[in-house]
Image: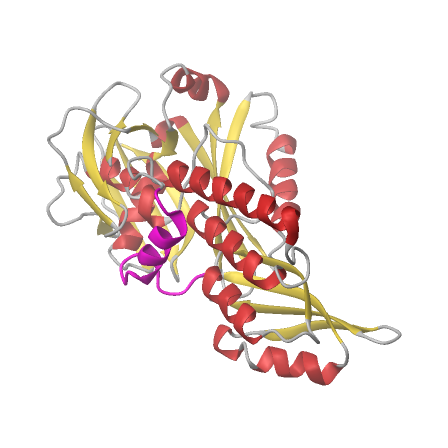
């Protein structure tokens, strides 16, 4: 798949993105499959906040209220998008704020993504396995400085003129001018997307690939009880197969969706694609779940997951949690009802 990344002024490069191999390279091809536009740091502002909890819906509401109540921002017509990072004790939210007029200018170009220059540089820093320190990127008239701790953004500053602060952001084989463009192309395979052209969702963020895998695992877990035999089951299977194809084609526009689940299994088996993700947890649950345990709700995102369910007694809950110990599962809540126990597990992956 060929991705073109441009600044609003038109300067850009083409990149060959191989999703299966998780590889991005500069390309000489003139035609492209997707267009990304990169919003310069000077056209944005940033907010970083730390929360001692992981409820994304609640966090987004707080972030929205903060921006609307800020006297410097309240009178402007703004668009903002956020990235979520697990900080060990809760969630760190990195919010990029832009003026709506700048977003609308890009919408006229029918681009697939309006990315942030700062986020693209952050991807480069993390690609280089830098998890602590200050990193700077020099531009013609300004300097961007990103501070991170434990792989989580701490601050972003944009200075006028030249300012060397910390370690220069570089990538072997990529010149400095092309570096942010390369970082934007990385969003296809690094699952760290920030797109001003999409609505910000309060639902748990799960990549389209994982969503398709969840569809399969849901069938495996529920088929024995909810859709056992009959016409209804066959119709549901057809609907899900169509949904799988749509999800696959959206995530991999250049790859025909011949057999999405088989193709996804191959991708998930690739060492470079993903090592451990929420699909692994769902797969383990499907293998180990007994009839005595009922799974009512499963949420995953930003390296954390939660499971809500019912069991006949607390001993069954403890056994279930023990079998998920490799995912750091812990019992965080139990409620004893008349003849069953409602429970909640939380863990990390």
Between 72 and 303, the residue placed more toward the observer is 303
Between 2 and 103, the residue placed more toward the observer is 2
Classify the position of the N terminus by image quarter: top left
The reply to whether residue 143 is in sight is yes
Residue depicted at x 20% and y 36%: 15
Callout count: 0
Determine the image quadrant of residue 10: top left
Between 317 and 96, the residue placed more toward the observer is 317
The reply to whether residue 53 is in sight is no
Residue depicted at x 57% and y 49%: 204
* Residue 260 lies in the magenta stretch: yes
Q: Is residue 219 above or below residue 100?
A: below
Q: Is residue 113 left or right of residue 54?
A: left
Residue depicted at x 60% and y 42%: 202
Residue depicted at x 40% and y 36%: 250
* Residue 162 lies in the magenta stretch: no
Q: Which residues are magenta?
A: 258-277
Q: Is residue 349 above or below residue 156?
A: below
Image spot of residue 246 (x, y percent): 45, 37
């Amino acid at each position: 798949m060929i991705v073109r990344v441009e600044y609003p002024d038109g300067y850009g490069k083409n990149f060959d993105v191989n999703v299966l191999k998780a590889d991005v390279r500069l390309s000489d091809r003139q035609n492209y499959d997707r267009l990304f536009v990169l919003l310069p740091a000077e056209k944005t502002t940033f907010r970083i906040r730390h929360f001692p909890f992981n409820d994304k819906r609640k966090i987004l509401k707080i972030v929205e209220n903060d921006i609307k109540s800020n006297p410097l921002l309240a009178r402007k017509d703004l668009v903002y998008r956020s990235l979520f990072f697990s900080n060990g004790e809760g969630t760190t939210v990195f919010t990029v704020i832009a003026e709506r007029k700048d977003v609308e200018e890009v919408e006229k170009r029918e681009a697939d993504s309006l990315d942030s220059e700062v986020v693209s540089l952050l991807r480069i820093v993390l690609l280089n396995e830098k998890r602590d320190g200050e990193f700077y990127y020099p531009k013609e008239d300004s300097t961007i400085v990103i501070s991170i701790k434990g792989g989580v953004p701490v601050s972003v500053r944009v200075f006028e003129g030249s300012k060397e602060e910390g370690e220069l952001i570089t990538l072997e084989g990529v010149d400095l001018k092309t570096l942010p463009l390369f970082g934007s192309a990385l969003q296809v395979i690094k699952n760290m997307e920030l797109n001003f052209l999409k609505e910000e969702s309060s639902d748990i963020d799960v990549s389209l690939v994982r969503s398709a895998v969840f569809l399969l695992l849901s069938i495996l877990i529920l088929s024995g009880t909810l859709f056992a035999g009959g016409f209804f089951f066959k119709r549901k299977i057809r609907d899900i197969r169509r949904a799988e194809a749509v999800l696959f084609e959206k995530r991999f526009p250049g790859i025909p969706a011949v057999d999405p689940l088989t193709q996804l299994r191959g991708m998930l088996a690739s060492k470079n694609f993903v090592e451990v993700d929420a699909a692994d947890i769902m797969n383990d649950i499907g293998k180990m779940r007994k009839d005595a345990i009922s799974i009512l709700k499963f949420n995953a995102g930003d390296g954390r997951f939660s499971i809500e369910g019912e069991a006949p007694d607390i001993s069954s809950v403890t056994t279930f949690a023990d079998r998920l110990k490799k995912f750091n599962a812990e019992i965080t809540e139990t409620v004893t009802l008349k003849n069953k126990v409602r429970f909640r597990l939380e863990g990390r992956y």
